[in-house]
Image (tube, rainbow, N blue to C red):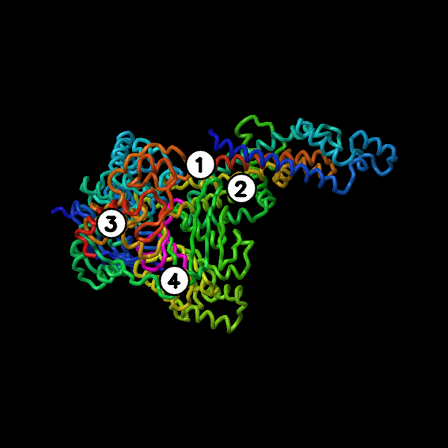
Amino acid sequence: MNEIVRVSGLRVAARNEEGIDVPIVHGADFSLNKGEVLALIGESGSGKSTIALSLMGYARSGCRIVGGSVRVGDVDVLKLSNAELAKLRGRTVAYIAQSAAAAFNPSKSIMDQVIESALIHGVLSRKQAQAKAVELFRELALPEPERIGARYPHQVSGGQLQRLMAAMALITDPALVILDEPTTALDVTTQIEVLRAFKKVVRERGTTAIYVSHDLAVVAQMADRIVVLRDGQIQENNPTEQILAAPEHPYTRSLLAAIRPAARQGAGDQEAASAEEDVLLDIHGLEICYGTKKVLQDVDLKIRRGAAVGVIGESGSGKTTLAQAIAGLAPTTAGHILLDGQPLSRTLAGRTREQFRRVQFVFQNADTALNPRHSIEQILGRPLRFYHGMKGAQQQRRVAELLELVQLPASIAQRRPGELSGGQKQRVNLARALAAEPDLILCDEVTSALDTVVGAAILELLRDLRRELGVSYLFISHDISTVRALCDDIVVMYSGHKVEAGDQQAFVQAPFHPYTNLLTNSVPELRQGWLENCGAAKGGLPPIGEPTSSAHLCPFLDRCPVRIEGVCNRSAPPRHNIAGGSEILCHHTGAELLKAQDCVNSMKLVGTYA
Amino acid sequence: MNSTIARLVGGRLAVGVLTLLIVSLVVFFLTSLLPGDAVQEQLGQEATAEAVAALRAQLGLDLPVHLRYFNWLGGLITGNPGISLVNGMPVDDMIASRLPNTLKLAAVTTLVSVPLALTIGILSAMYRGSIFDRYSNMLAVFAVSVPEFLIATIAVLIFAVKLGWLSALSRSVEVESFGELVRIYALPVLTLCCVLTAQMARMTRAAVVDQLSASYVEMAILKGARPIRVVLRHALPNAIGPIANAVALSLSYLLGGVVIVESIFNYPGVATLMVNGVVTRDMPLIQACVMLFSLGFLMLVLLADLCAILSNPRLRK
C-alpha cells in the first residue's frame, strides 16, 4: 500500500478572547497516496490552512490541535515531541507559504534560505545543496539560475520568489509538500507561469502534495483529488473530474456557480447610453512622476455621469495611482482633470470641500481603512458631519439609512469593525463613501480581499447602488471578469500607459491589444487541462533586436508575443481604433491581431463547456 | 563599502556636523545669558571698575558677542577650547585629566551591561509570557524606576558597610590588578548597570518579539529550525537596527549623565567636572563639556545608524 498520509478525526480549536476553546476543525478524515496531489479548498475561515499546517504538527498562535491523528509515513505527527517535530519539518514534510515576500527573511541571501533546511537536517553538504538548488532553479525556469541565489529577496519579483520557495521546499526531497495558497498573491499573468513551473516539478519528481486554495479553477489544474471544506468540516472528497462535472454536495455546487463568470447582458445600461455626452470626469494627458520615474504617462479618460469605468492591469501598472491622482492624493506632473468642466487642483490643498465631497475613495482593504477603535456610527457619522453638518438624531437617522442602503442591519451601528465579517466591513467602507453623497466613487480593488461568494455579493450591491443613486464608478481591479461584469467602459493599463480602452462589448471578443489578450487568457478556466493548452504566455517570444531609440517605444515590447522586428523596437506605436470598437496603443491593425488571437482562442474553445 | 553606504554615511555625517554647529550656537548664547559674572566672582565685590575692565579685556570678554562666538568656535575646532575663568588652567587640560576616567567607567559598564541586556532581552522574547519573562520584566521596571542614588546607597550599605567586600569610594583610579579593578569599579558599575541593562533589555525584547511574529519566522520553524536558530539566525539580524539605536541611546548617558554616581563614589569623571564648572560659573569649561557630550552622543547615534544600514541588505545593496 502506498498511502502516505492518513488524517483521521483531526480536531483543532482556537482560543477566543474569553479564553474558551472554540473548535475550528471538527474531525477531518482523508488520506493521500504517494505521488498524488490533493487539494483542500474552501473560503477563508474554512480551516483549510489549519488542516494543512497540522500535517506538520504546527498550529498558529492561539490555536491548538486537540484530537485525532495525523499519520505521515508511519509516524503519528501529533504524538511527536518538539525536537522530533523539528526533525520532521522541512525534511519529511515541507511547506510553501502564501506570501513568499513575507516568508523570505529580508536580511539573508536567497541561497542561504533555500538550502537552510538541507543543512539543518544534514541531508546534503553546503556544496551539494547549492548545486542542487541551482538545478531546481533551472527546473523552475528561474532566470540566471547560477546567480539568482546570491541576491536578496527584495531584488527579485514576487513570482520568482514564489518559485524560489518551491525550490526551498524541494531541496530535501520531502515525502510530502504542502502548498498553501502559493499563487493567490500573484497577478494572473505571473500565476500562470508559477503554476506551470510547479506542475512541471511536481510531475517530474513524482511529488506528493497537498494544495490549499480558495480558487477551484487553479486547483482544477493541479490536483488529482479535491477535498471541499466549509466551517472546519469536510463537505465532499472526490476526484477532480467528478467535482467539476458532477459535484455531489450542494455547497460544492454553489462554489462552482460563484466562479463561473456571470455573463452579464446589456452592460451598457440604457440610462447611461442616453446620457452619452454628459461627461462627469474628463482626464486629459495625465502624467505622474515619482522622482524621475514616470508611473503614469499620457492617460486620457472620460467618465460619463452614472457610468462605470473599469481599470485593469497587473500590480505596478499605475491603476491605483490613477485613482489617487483623481482623488488628489498623488500630485500630477502634467495634464489636467476636469470635474463637470471645472479643473480639479493637482493637490489636496487646492481643492474645495465640495470637490472632496463629490469624489470619494473606497480603499481595497476595509480592515486597515476603518478605524478599529471607532464604532460604525462614528465612522459613518464623521463624513455626515463634515460634509453635511448633520448632528444628533438627524445624523443617527441618516446612518441607519446608509446601513440599509448597503444592506446591513441598523443594529450594527454600535459595533466596531473588528466584530464584523470581511464582507460587512467592505459594505461599511462603501457606506462611508456614500455618506458624502458623491458623484464619483473610486473603488480600488474592493472585492480582491474577499471570498468569491462575498465578492460577488458586493458587486451586486455596487450595481444596485448605481441604479438607485445614479453614482459613477471608477472601478479598479486586476481581474478582467470582475470588471466585465460591472462596467460599461474598460481601460487596460500597462506600465503606466493606457494600452486599450473601449466599451464592455469590445472586450468580449478578439481582437484585443496583445496585453489584454494575455490577461484574458491567463484567467484560469474551470476545466482540467486548461493550464497545458491555454494560449497565454506559452512558448518563446519572437526574437527582437535591441531597441534603437528609447523615445516612447511600446511599453509591452519585452513581453509581447506579436512584436515585429524593425517596427516595435524602432518607433512609437500609434493609438488607433480596431474592429471590436476599442482604441489600442499598438502597431498592429485590428485584422492582424484578430488573426493572431483567433487561432489561439478557437483552439481554447475545444473541450470547453462554458 | 560602496557608493550607497558612502552616500548614506556622508549624509549622516553632514547632518551631524550641522547639529553640532547648532548645539554650539545654543550652548554659547544660552550660557552667556546665565546670570552671574566670573570676573566679578573672581575679583570679589571690592574690585575697582578698572580692574574688572582690565581682566575682561584680558579674557576677551569685552568683545561683541558674535566675535566672541567665532573666537570660541575657532578655538574648539583647533583643539583649544579656552582658559578656565576660575583657575586659569587650559580647559582641555582639565578635561584631559578627567576624560580617561569617564571612558574607563563607561567601557567597563558597557562590557557588562550590553551582553547582559541582550541575553535577557532575547531570552525573554523567546520565552515571552513565561515566568522568566514576567520576572525580568518586573525587575526591569523596578530598576528603571528606583533612583540611582538609592540603588547606589543601598549597594554601598550592603557590599561596603555590612559585608565589607568592596570599597565605598573610588579614591584611586590607578588599577594594578584584576582584584583591584573589581574592587574599584564593582559598585559604580553595578549601579549604572541596573538602570542601563533594564532599558536595553526591554528594547531588545520588543524588537525581537516584533520580528518573531513575522511570516519568515513561521517559515523557519516549518523548515525544522530549532528555537535558538530561529532567534539568532532569523529574527536577530532583522532586529539589529532598533537594538543598536536603543544601545546607543543608553550608552550616551554614560558620558555626561553619571553625575550622581560619580559624586556618590567620589569618582573623578567629566560629569563632576562640569557640575563644578556650573557652580563656579566657569563658562568655557561648561561649554567645552557640553560640546564633548554632544559629540559623543552624535557619534554613538551615527554608529547605531551604521549598524542598522549594514544589517539591512536593502540599504547595503
Disc 2 target residue: B196
User: Is there CB contact under 8 Å for labels 2 and 1?
Assistant: no
Tag count: 4
Q: Amino acid at mark 2?
A: Leu
Which of the 4 image quarters holds residue A469? Answer: bottom left
Whole-angstrom CA distance, mark 2 to mark 3, is: 50 Å
SS assignment at label 2: helix
Asked if both marks, 2 and 3, belong to the same chain, the answer given is no
Respond whether the residues carrying marks 3 and 1 are from the same subunit.
no
Q: CA distance from mark 4 to mark 3?
A: 34 Å
**Residue type marked 3:** Tyr
Horizontal side of residue A499 vs A48, given as left or right:
right
Nearer to the camera, A35 or A243: A243
- Residue A211 numbered mark, or none: 3
| Protein chain holding label 3 | A
The subunit carrying tag 1 is B
Q: Tags 3 and 1 in contact by the CB under 8 Å rule?
A: no
Q: Point out the stretch of residues depicted in magenta.
A: A473-495
**Residue where numbered disc 1 is placed:** B311
Residue B136 in the image, given as x and y percentages of width and height: 46, 47
Q: Name which residue type carries label 1.
A: Ser
Q: Residue at x 57, y 27 (%)?
A: B175
